Image (cartoon, helix red, strand yellow):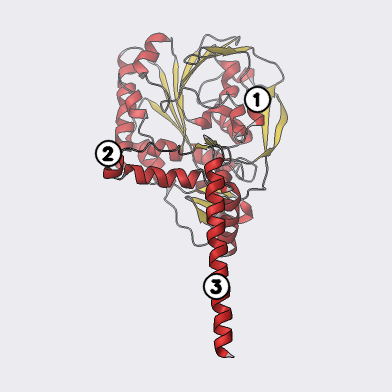
Amino acid sequence: MKSKQNRERAMGDALLGIMFLICVVVLNCAGLLKKDKKISESENRSLAERPEFTIEGVVRGSFGDNLEAYLSDQFIFRDGFRTIHTGLKLAGGSRLQNNIFYGKNGQLMKNIDKPDREVLSGTVEAINSLAEYVKGTDEKAIYMMLVPDVAAIYPELLPSYAQIEDEETYFQEVRAGLAENVTWIDGISVMRKYKKEKIYYKTDHHWTTRGAYHMFEETAETFELDAEKETDYDIYPIATDFNGVLSGNSGFAAHERDEIDVYLPKVQTDVIVNYVDEQKKKSSLYDVNKLAAKDKYGVFLGGNSSLIDIRTTAESDRSILIIKDSFANCYIPFLVPYYREIVVVDPRYYAGTVAEVLEDYRIDDILFLYSGNTFLTDNHIAGFMTI
């Protein structure tokens, strides 16, 4: 009897093994037949492409690494397996995936990045060089606005075991290192003041338009903007099915949806938006075509571009240069009624220098507007700041 049970168990194990091998072969064959995807919309990133076989690549090991990345990225039914994998991790108690926390109330939060001290020091020194340069030529106002990441404002929503870097301390170190003629804007205080409101998306790392509006509202006086021009807005939800980058990158909250609002002033100021490197112009700050994409936050300015020149019909002769990351994209519309020209540069994509921009455009004010995580780790800023 025992021998028969052993034989049946062995046959069952063998059958299971054969079925597993068949599944592996079928999935791999199907993967070879399917067309490769260039972009993962759910993760908002480019996917690895099929590597070219070379003897040199095999010897150096790069071919094997690239092949592994390719097979991982182009695996058939990959998104479905990612969803199952993440669900199992959640069920097992894990609340961290790809450096993203699944917080209380389903709030997703990117971990606070620890800055590279050398990179951060170089960034601050480069900004101070700019401050010294404009001080010696014409007195341009320089402002520094760092927007805290959601984990810094809502630490109580982090999983109970989570330990994160102290972003506020890093901000204070940056502030202490800046030249006297760089005006610091306390973004942490503003965001804490309104933390009971929906100032961050649940599935994305960006602040909401409401968060950007409160920042503008609280800092307009610092920019010496005309208080009499205070604008009333109509608020429109232009998307109610936004599932952001944090969800895509982690697999968490795949069925959660955020709302994207736009604030349109009751008295409109016309604009011409010139995407300089792309050589295209538009008459709107919003690209509604992006609402059909996965990353609907791209509706603001059409996403990230290297250099944008916005001309307005504002009753003003002031101009501003904004050096920024994507957090600025939903903030910029609030400045339109107050500036005749807004020049926008993202150093991650722009190949030139700040000296060239200052030579090509007449600039009165300069604003650095970044999220904390980007500013503390971005190694492109110092290179752009070449004078």
The amino acid pointed to by label 1 is: Asn
Which label's residue is closer to the chain start, 1 or 3? Answer: 3
How packed mark 1 is, by other alpha carbons closer than 10 Å (few <14, some 14-19, many 20 or more), is few
Residue shown at the point (54%, 29%) measured from the top left: 219
Could you tell me which residue is drawn at 56 percent across and 58 percent down? 22
How dense is the environment of label 2, judged by Cα within 10 Å: few (below 14), some, or many (20 and up)?
A: few
Residue 140 placement, left or right of 189: left
The kind of residue tagged 3 is Asp
* Whole-percent x, y for residue 23 in the image: 57, 57
Tags 2 and 3 in contact by the CB under 8 Å rule?
Answer: no
The secondary structure type at the circle numbered 1 is: helix
Q: Which mark is residue 278?
A: none
Give the quadrant of the N terminus.
bottom right
- Residue that label 3 marks: 13
Does the CB distance between marks 1 and 2 fall below 8 Å?
Answer: no
Which residue is the extreme one toward the bottom? 1
The part of the image, by quadrant, that contains residue 244 is top right
Report the residue marked by disc 2: 56
Residue toward you, 337 or 208: 208
Mark 1 or 2: the one toward you? 2
Q: Position of residue 209 (x, y in %)?
A: 62, 33
Query: Quadrant of the image for the C terminus?
Result: top left
- In the picture of the structure, the residue carrying the numbered disc 1 is 289
The local secondary structure at tag 2 comes to helix
